[in-house]
Amino acid sequence: MRKILFFIGGLVSGGKERRFIELLSYLKSLGGYELLVVTTTSEVHFPAFFDLNIPLKKINTKGLLKTAGIPLELRKIALQFQPDVIHTWGRMQNFYALPSKMILGIPLINSQITNASPYTSQVNRIIDRINFRLSDLILSNSYAGIEAYKPPVSKTRVIYNGMNLGRFVNLPEKSAIKEKYKITTPFCVVMVATFSKNKDYERFFSVAAKVIESRQDITFVGVGYFHRDASLYKKCQTLIKNNPLMLMTGVISDVEALVNAADLGVLFSNKEVHGEGISNAVLEYMALGKAVIANDAGGTREIIKNSENGYLVDQESIEDLSSKIQYLIDNPKKREELGASGKSLVEKNFSIQKMGYNFSRLYDDFWITQLPKE
C-alpha cells in the first residue's frame, strides 16, 4: 500500500482544488493507495470529497505562532502517518513541507505550478528558487507554466488536467436551471471563475452592459467564489446593479448544470498579473459542447485552437468583444461546430482516466526510484 500525504491550502471552490478532488477520486477508485489530506482552512466546497472517506487534517494557523507553526505541525502529522511521499499543491504548502523532507527524509513532489503568471513578487521568486531546488519532482499542468516559472528541466513534468466526464451527463432540464437562477432570456453567457484580481470580471460585465444596450435577449452570469468585502466584488456589484440581465451567483453546487443551460462560455483573465495554466472552466465549457471565448493567456492556447474550437482574444475593445459574442449567439451552427470540436478534444486528451493514469504511473515510477539499493 503506497502512502501519500497531500498538503493543499484548502478545498474551497477553484480550478486547482477541483482538479485535486478529481485526482483523489481516481486514486481512491484505483486502490493500492492510503491517502491523507492536510489543509490550513476548514472550508470544503466539494461535497464529493466526503464521499471518498479520505482522512482530512486541518493545521490550526491561529494563535501567537500562526503560520510559523505550520512546518512543525506538518512534520508531526508526517511522523505519525509515515507517508512514502508528500505531494504539495501550492507555493507556501511546498515551502512549509521542506522541513519534513529534510528532517524525516520524505520525498517531496511539488505541484505549485498551476498557472503561467507573468509577474510574481521578489519574495515569491526567492521561495520558488528554494522550492524548486529542494523538491524531488516538480509538476506543472501546462507547458506555459514551465516557461513562466523556469524550474529545473531535469526534474519537471507536465500532466494536463483531467475531468470525470460523467459529471456532464444526466443533468437537469435546462429550463429548470434557468428558472432556478432567474434567467428569463432565450440566451445565456457564463463566466465561471473565482472573483479575484486574476480574473477580469470587470471586462466581462462591461461587455455585458454593451451588449444589453442594443438587445435584451441575453443574460450574463458570473459564477464563482467571492469575498463580500473585496473590492472586485463591490465593483461588479456596482456594474450589475438593478440589471436583471447581469447576475452573480457566488459558489454553487451545480456548475455543470448551469453551464449546460448556457449558450456560450467566456473566460477573461487579467493578463497584467495572471496567465492561466490549464483552465478547468474552459475544459468544462468544452466538455458540455459550448463554444468558448477566452484570453490568449498562458496555457489557454494549449487548449483553444483559434476559430477551430473557440476564439482566443487579446486586446480587443469592449465593442469588439460584444460583437463577437453577438455573432456567436446569432449563429447557432458556428456555435455547434466550435462546441463539438472542443468536446472531442476534451474527451481525447483531458479525461480523468488519462490524468489519473499519468499521476499513478508517476507515483509508481517515483516510488521505485526511491527504494533503497541493495
Image (cartoon, grey):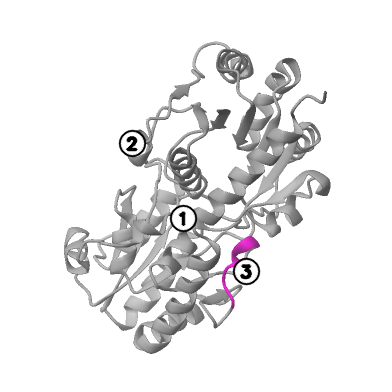
Disc 2: which residue: 51
Q: CA distance from mark 2 to mark 3?
A: 35 Å
Query: Quadrant location of the C terminus?
Result: top right
> Relative to residue 15, is residue 150 drawn left or right?
right
Expressed as whole percent of the image width and height from the top left, the position of residue 73 reads 57, 15
Label 3 sits on a secondary structure element that is helix
> Relative to residue 351, is residue 110 drawn left or right?
right
Residue 111 seen in the figure:
no
Earlier in the chain: of badge 1 and badge 3, it is 1
Residue 320 seen in the figure:
yes
> Relative to residue 39, is residue 212 drawn left or right?
left
**Magenta-highlighted residues:** 298-305
Disc 3: which residue: 301
Q: What is the three-letter code of the residue carrying label 3?
A: Arg
Expressed as whole percent of the image width and height from the top left, the position of residue 234 reads 39, 49
Disc 1: which residue: 163
Q: Which residue corresponds to the image point at 51% horizontal and 77% vertical from the top-left?
A: 309
Q: Is residue 369 above or below residue 360?
A: above
> Relative to residue 72, is residue 164 drawn left or right?
left
